[in-house]
Image (cartoon, rainbow, N blue to C red):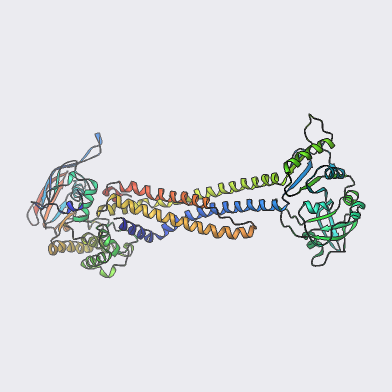
Amino acid sequence: MFWSSILLALRAIRRNLLRSFLTILGIVIGVSAVITMVTLGNGATRAVADQISSLGSNLIMVRPGKRLGPGRDEAGSPNFKARDAEAITTQIGSLNAIAPVASKSVTVVYAARNWSTTVTGSTNAYFTAGNWRLADGRVFTGTEQRAGKAVCVIGATVRKELFGGQPPLGDELRIKNFACEVIGLLQSKGQSAMGMDQDDIIVIPLRTLQRRLTGTQDVNTLMVSVQDGGDTSRIMADLRLLMRERRKIGANEDDNFSILDTRQIAEAMTGTTKVLTMLLGAVAAVSLLVGGIGIMNIMLVSVTERTREIGIRLAIGALEREVLLQFLVEAVALSALGGIVGIILAMLASLGLAKVMQVPYIFDPSINLLSFVFSAAIGVVFGYFPARRAARLDPIEALRHE
Amino acid sequence: MNAASVRAAPETGALIELRDVTKTYGQGPATFLALRGVNLRIGAGEFVAIMGPSGSGKSTAMNILGCLDNPTSGAYLFRGMHVENLTRNQRALLRRYYLGFVFQGFNLLARTTALENVELPLVYRGEPRAARHAKARTALDAVGLRQWEHHTPAELSGGQQQRVAIARAIVTDPTILLADEPTGNLDSQRSHEIMDLLAALNGDRGITVLMVTHEPGMARYAKRIIRFVDGQVDSDHHNGENA
């Protein structure tokens, strides 16, 4: 009885190719949408984490203002000075590099080309702290840093936009109103976690920036790179005390600066992408639901025809349980086929899209299983239950069904 | 009771017998009495036409005789066995092993070839594939449609569809063939072809044929005519005798 029911079910699938195809299609779309979106979301999260770790593993950022990010209240929070960096160098140990950083957006010109970019003023410590390597040329000399000479180290994007294929070393760019000799070229880092081009950068000595571009002694950020094995949390606590003291903050007052390490930044940003992944997953879940409603529709539309068919089968001597088994096998086979095709399609789509979006492909078994089970359940429920109702009718009633 | 015991039903007296059978539909004030005490005996090898106006209970009687429906009261004996006490599944097994059905609306499976339609009852009997094909082809041969075996109902005329349905009904060598208005959807030439076929099955193979019809021209093929009026047997006579 079992085998004959399977035989009948497979025949019914073959007979009703269009209906079977539409049922499978609903499941395929739902399953592949959910899996693809969640897989890409996971890939993006991983990409963000990878890029943050490329920043330098033990980096601490000290910034004026209480909070980091948009709307940070800089009003009333004085900027740092280059001397703050020197104080940290002398008073706190286990550090690789301390870089005072100030920056300004400007348009730079070379020959007939110009390019809007950010000019960063800092010391050679910036290259260490920011994990930068030179592709060509050299970094600043001590004299250049102290005297504020017009020399610069440029990123790959700036080089491409201004110099094209020409070798840039030794040439001079115009930054606002002064000429600046290119002495070094940085290795490309690619996009940052926030989607910004990290190679769109010009680094000049801090003093040069302060004198020729900003006209102040201000420093926006102190980048502190901790030695491997250094106790980051202890150093952060020391930094806080030192800064409170130097900024003359009373015992009852809040900090007017913030200290963050890359791990915290990484947590904040991977947290954001995780939320986005969940959002994508929710959108995809809606498409799974819509696919499910499609299946439901097709099954219900064919109820009249199926009820008559069930009536015929009962009249010629089929048992209720034989009819039910046939319809159950049919529903399971269609749903499973749809689920498997959906998983394969999702795998191909996420591999392709991951390449395009430059995120890693990560296979997530739980979401594959979850969406498969869900769609299979929809297929089985809506394929089986209308059939069960029909099989419980008197054969005569089922035959008369209009 | 299982399949074996159904098959081993004893053969005593009439093939089928209705004793004081009533059938009511609905409840309370909407109750409708479709059958009001019907007594009937039909022997093996008979060709019986059941006639009567609409609402006379002839189709209800047919459904009870075909084990598709149970009487409200009274007894239905099939080879001496009380069908009214059987469960749904037991009645299904009776239909499977003893009965063949032909309906007014043909009731073939859509998008299914004639051969597959005809072999369907054999699938439920668990017959192997080769035997199913051979028997189904023989049955299609008997109705003259052997060369149409790969056509679906949509590709066949009404008369051809009804002949496929007859082939499906006889492929199991049933004891009784029940036909409910088998010519109701056909023109007169096809109708006579179908009736010739039923008469031949009765005459040559000895299959008991029970047929409901309201066309006197079709009833003429039967050997015995039972007329229903208002849920009761009004007349019962052999063909050619006066009512």
At 32% from the left edge and 54% from the top edge, which residue is drawn? A309
A74 and A398: which is toward the camera: A74
Instruction: Give the quadrant of residue A175.
Output: bottom right
The answer to whether residue A240 is left or right of residue B165 is right
- Measuring from the top left, give residue A283's x and y in whole percent: 56, 48
Seen as rendered, the residue at the extreme top is A252
Seen as rendered, the residue at the extreme right is A147
- Measuring from the top left, give residue B179's x and y in whole percent: 20, 55
Reply above or below: A390 against B170.
above
The answer to whether residue B132 is left or right of residue A231 is left
Instruction: Count the numbered circles shown.
Output: 0
- Measuring from the top left, give residue A338's x and y in whole percent: 46, 56
Instruction: Give the quadrant of residue B239.
Output: bottom left
One can see residue A341 in this view: yes
A151 and B72: which is toward the camera: A151
A177 and A194: which is toward the camera: A194
Locate the N terminus of chain A by quadrant. Answer: bottom left
One can see residue A69 in this view: no
The answer to whether residue B216 is left or right of residue A203 is left
A198 and A110: which is toward the camera: A198
- Measuring from the top left, give residue B204's x and y in whole percent: 13, 64
Seen as rendered, the residue at the extreme bottom is B147
Reply above or below: A375 against B170.
above
